Image (cartoon, rainbow, N blue to C red):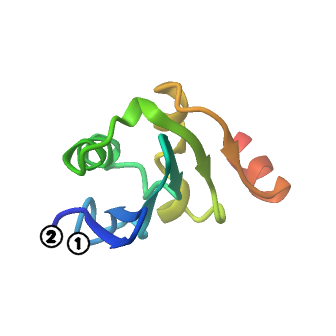
Amino acid sequence: MEAFKVYDGIYIIGGPDISHPYDCAVYLVVAGDKLIIIDSGAGESFNILERNIQTLGFNPQNVTAVIATHAHLDHSGCFPALYKKAFPPFFSTSHVANMLHQ
């Protein structure tokens, strides 16, 4: 299965049948020229997520925010790779932020 449009401005770019069997659903939200990633999968699929953003016609360098819904590995495993790639700010609860910084 490939990345697909869920609704206007909302896409699934990752998940068990799209990027890696251990990934949660990873969403891309398009708001004008800004891209927002919600969750990141388990950590094995960064290159696939990046490719899926491109396949949908968007530039991964236009990601302006990453949102962590919670710190389970299937939702947060790619955060280190996203951070190293210089994707800007991460948003989460303070509890999630503390877990991810450990």
The earlier-in-sequence mark between 1 and 2 is 2
Q: Residue at x 43, y 58 (%)?
A: 41
Mark drawn on residue 25: none
Residue matched to label 1 = 17
Please identify the quarter of the rendering in which residue 83 is found.
Answer: top right
* Residue at 50 percent of width and 52 percent of height: 37
Q: Position of residue 53 (x, y in %)?
A: 30, 46
**Residue that extends furthest to the left in the rendered view of this protein:** 1
**Residue farthest to the right, as pictured:** 94
- Foreground pick, 1 / 61: 61
Can residue 52 be seen by looking at this rendering? yes
The residue sitting at 34% across, 35% down in the picture is: 59
User: Residue at horizontal 54%, vertical 44%?
Assistant: 79
State the image coordinates of residue 25 (x, y, percent, origin top left).
41, 70
Vertical relation: 24 (above or below) 29: below
Toward the viewer: 73 or 81? 81
**Residue 54 higher or lower than 67, as above or below:** above
| CA neighbours of label 2 inside 10 A, class few (<14), some (14 to 19), many (20+) | few
Q: Is residue 78 left or right of residue 19?
A: right
Please give the residue where the numbered disc 2 appears in the rendered image: 1
| Vertical comparison of 25 with 80: above or below | below
Residue 96 in the image, given as x and y percentages of width and height: 74, 56
SS type, badge 2: loop
